[in-house]
Amino acid sequence: MNEHDSEKVAGVLLARGYRQVETPESASLILYNTCSIREKAAQKLFSRLGVYRDLLGGEQKIGVLGCVAQQEGEAIFARAPWVSLVCGSASYRNLPQLLAQLEAGEERVSGLGIDTDETFETEVTRRDNPWRAYITIIEGCDKACAYCVVPFTRGPERSRDSARILAELRKLAELGYSEVQFLGQTVNSYADPSPRKMRFSELLLEAAQVPGIRRVRFTTSHPRDFTPDIVAAIDAHPGICNHVHLPVQSGSTRVLRAMQRTYSRDEYLEKIAMIRGARRRTAITTDIIVGFPGESEAEFDETLSLLDVVKYDGVFSFKYSPRPNTPATAMPDAIPEEEKSRRLSLLQEKQRRIQIESLRGLAGNIFEVHVDGKSKKENHWHGHSSCNRVVNFASTQDDILGRYVAVRVNGCTPNSLLGEHTSN
Ligand code: SF4
């Protein structure tokens, strides 16, 4: 999402007549986009700003964007007086105006409001991937997970008008993009503000019918809002990718309550059963936090057992670490760092075994692979399946970059499939 924000910000600059340069030294304006999902994000920001100051000698204007800009606010000007612009992601729609103020000679400008019902609409968006385009369909988040900064940094949920989303998609298809990824912190909580009131599943179906669009992805889904019509849409149209990223965070209902995730273990498993009940075999991936304050050994074991039950196709796992302004920072019974690390490695090792077993079971299957790169090894390529698996394969053809080809699987590594290009 942050990467796509950067693409959109670059689009705003291009529309104002700016031109992109290759190095910080040759820039007259540097915008540094930040993310606070990692620990010590503020510390890293100030050390990077120090590097810019030393490297650039004060000639350039420097701006800070994103979640850390939102969190630190105008305190950034006090700690790094060589910064001219601070803007949180909920205020990006004000960027053209902030840039105009800077160009008019103002020393310091900021956009830090989060109480908004507007979305960030851009005319021009510079895109880094030649085939896969990202489209934000919903910004902000109205959930209140106890560990998460997003509601404080990105503001309340605001969905974009479905007609504007589809118009943007048609334009992208005309430009040659064949794959789109709809983005949102809780993408499936999409609520069309236009009179058409399209459901999320209807938007997926309509997007999949846009001429030239071969694949429609979406991320990240919130389990509470994952409804049967989304599964029905995946079943109804092969252009909607058979991959669902459904973060669970913990396998223990008690921990889920403490996290304020709004579902229990059983309710989550009902959603999994619904997806598994689809006609198309759909890959499921998830996010897990280990060592949330107060997580007992038995509760952690429930997360391990969830892995056995669901058999995820991929897991992004993290040690809990506190974030400023979040309720979880005040919770008692912090888990010691070494214990968090122990739990994380146990979980990752378990998942590694589950994943290898399921990837091995795919030998002999044929996948449609979108070829997105050439490997160093001669006659070898890599790409993604509709279910978002990485596939490395051999092909004697040399003009397949960007194409969709059939690959027969003949092996695997812990994280990818191996195969060969086939005409069947
Ligand atoms: S749903 Fe996601 S973005 Fe929203 S508060 Fe929870 S973790 Fe954060």
Image (tube, rainbow, N blue to C red):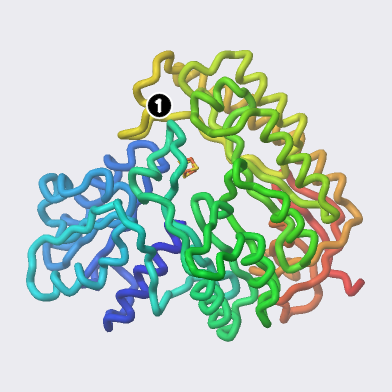
Q: Is residue 269 left or right of residue 104?
A: right
At which x and y percent is residue 392? 74, 60
Residue found at x 55% / y 33%: 262
Tell me the residue at 37%/28% (across/down).
327
Q: Position of residue 355 (x, y in %)?
A: 75, 40
The residue at label 1 has a CB less than 8 Å from ligand 1: no
Position above or below: 73 against 330: below
Q: Residue sitting at 67 percent across and 21 percent down?
A: 302
Q: How many marks?
A: 1
Amino acid beneath label 1: Ala
Residue 149 lies, in percent from the top left, at 38, 40
Nearest the eye: 240 or 392 = 240
Q: Secondary structure at mark 1?
A: helix
Indicate whether 188 appears above or below 274: below
The x, y position of residue 126, in whole percent, is 43, 75
Q: Is residue 403 visible?
A: yes
Mark 1, Cα crowd under 10 Å, few <14 / some 14-19 / many 20+, is many
Quarter-of-image position of residue 401: bottom right
Give the residue pinned by disc 1. Answer: 328
